[in-house]
Image (cartoon, helix red, strand yellow):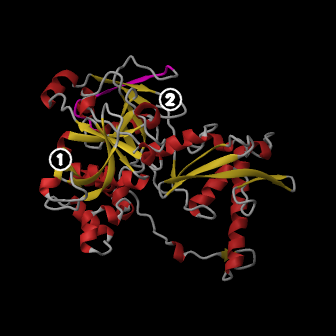
Amino acid sequence: MPQLLHSLKCVFFLLCAVITGLSMAQCKGHYIINTMLAFEVNCWLHPTISCNSEKTSEDGMGKVVEIPAEMTARDLCQLLVYKSHCVDDNSWALVEHHPLLGLERCLEDHELVVQVQAAMSSDSRFVFRKNYAKYEFFRNPLSFFPEHMVAWCQETNRTIPPSQLLQNFLATSSCPEVQGYLYVKEMGRKSWKKVYMFLRRSGLYCSTKGTSKEPRHLQCLADLDDSNILTVISSKKQHGAPQTLASPNKCRGELKDMRMFCAEDEQGRTCWMTAFRIFKYGIVMYQNYKIPQQRKTLLSHFSAPVRSVSENSLVAMDFSGRIGRVIDNPVEAQSAAMEEGQAWRRTQRMNVLGSHSPLHHSSLHSVIHIAQLWFHGRISREESHRIVHQQGQVDGLYLLRVSQSNPKAFVLTLCHHQKIKHFQILPREEDGQHFFSLDDGATKFTDLIQLVEFYQLNRGVLPCKLRHPCTVVAL
C-alpha cells in the first residue's frame, strides 16, 4: 500500500466532529462588544487575526479590532476591507488557521466569528486573505463535478446543463450523491486503506463490500451537521503525506475524532470538498453567493445611468485626413490600435515624469511595477505555489515575481485547470530601447504593467487570460 500511495498524486483532507462551543446566550454574556481580536500583519504574505491579543506575527507587528458578538465572517471581511482600503470585489475570506496542526478552514459568510473563536485553541488564529474559489462553483459548476463522480449523471446517462446541476445540488428533497474511491487513515495510525465512499446530504458513508450501495453494506463515517472539513497546510512534514500536493483539513473537534482522506488528484479533492460544503449548508451557501450581487443591483439604481456599448458596435477610425473614415482592413485596424496604445503609454509616462524630470525612462520601467498588487518580489517557486493554492485555484489567477535563475528576468505564475504554470519574462533591447517579452520577442512591452494589461485582454500564448491577481494587503 505505501508503494501504491507514492505512485499517486495524493490530495488529503481531514474530517472530524465539531465541538459546538458556547451558546448564543453565553456568547452575548462573555463577548458582547468586548471581543478583542489581534491582527497579525505580515508585510509580504497575509495579515492574520489571532485569538490571543498578546500573540504576534514573525515580524512582531500586530493590530487589535473590537467586534460585536453577532458579527458574521462577511461583515468582518467588509470591515477589514474598509480599514485596509482594499477593493471590495467579494472575494475576501476569513480563514481559521491552526498552525500546530497544520490545518485551516475558510469560514462561510454567515458564520458568527465569536462562536468559531470560542472553540479554537489559544495557538489558533484567523487569517484575512483572498479566496477567489469560494463561490466559483456557482459560476462554473460542471468543472467542479466530473460526471463519473456524480451518481445522478451516471443514472441519466446524458450531459447535464449547468443550471440543472445547480438545481439538483441545492434541492432539499433530493440531490445527487458524490461517489468514488478515497484513501482513509484514522488519527494515530500510519496505514492507509482504499475505500469506496458515498457523500449524501445525510452524511459520509463507506462501502464495506466493494462499490455496493446496499444499506447493509454502508457504514456512516460522519454526520454533516456535526462535522467540518478543512485543508492541510504542510501535509508532508506534519501528517506524513506521500506527496507535497496534499491539502490537509481539520475541524474544531478532538484529535481522536479526526479522519484523514486522500484523493488521487486535485480535481477529485475539489469535488469532494465542494460537495461537502453544498450538502452541509445548501441554500444558505447560495444566498451567501447572491447577497453581494443583490446589493450591487440595489446600489446601481441610485447611480447615474451609463450607456452600454458592446465590443461589436465599435469600429476603428482614421482621423489623419480632413474627415474621418472607417478602417475596413483588419490588418490596418490592428496596426492603428497598436500605434494608439504606444502613444497612450508614452503620454502616461510623460504625465508621471513631467516634462523636465531627470529620471530616465529606462530606470522607470524597471521599477514601476513594484507598487502593483500582483507583484510579489523575490519569492520562491514553492512560495508562489502556496499563495496560489491559498487564494483559490481558479482559471486566470496569477502573480508576477523575480526569477530565481535569472535576476534580470521575471516569472508569470498562472493557474489554469487547477494546474500552476510558470512563464519566464525576459528583458530585451532593440535600437537602444528596453522591452519585456514572454514569447521570444513576438510581443514586446515597455514595462510589466503594460504586459499584464495586454494579457488581461488577450490570451496570446497563455492558456487563458489574466483574470484574478494574487494580492497582498497590510492592515
Name the residue tied to disc 1. 220
Question: Residue 263 vs residue 455: left or right?
Answer: left
Residue 283 position (above or below residue 124): below
Q: Position of residue 40 (x, y in %)?
A: 44, 26
The kind of residue on which mark 2 rests is: Asn
Magenta stretch bounds: 60-72
Q: Is 138 in front, or is 61?
A: 138
Query: What separation in Å lies between label 1 and label 2 (alpha carbons)?
Result: 42 Å
* Quarter the N terminus occupies: top left
Q: Earlier in the sequence, mark 1 or mark 2?
A: 2
Q: Give the x, y percent position of residue 472.
A: 51, 38
Q: Nearer the viewer, mark 1 or mark 2?
A: 1
Instruction: Rate crowding at label 2 as few (under 14), some (14 to 19) or many (20 or more) other CA atoms within 10 Å.
Output: some
Residue 185 sits in quarter: top left
Amino acid on which the number 1 mark rests in the picture: Cys
Q: Is residue 97 placed above or below 293 in the rendered structure?
A: above
Q: Main secondary structure of the magenta part?
A: loop
Callout 2: SS? loop
Q: Residue shown at 60%/76% (left/top)?
A: 315
Residue 358 x, y percent position in the rendering:
81, 39
* Pointer 2 residue: 42
Can residue 69 be seen at all in this image of the molecule?
A: yes
Whether the magenta-drawn stretch holds residue 369 is answered as no
Q: Residue at x 21, y 25 (%)?
A: 32
**Viewer-closest of 71 and 98:** 98
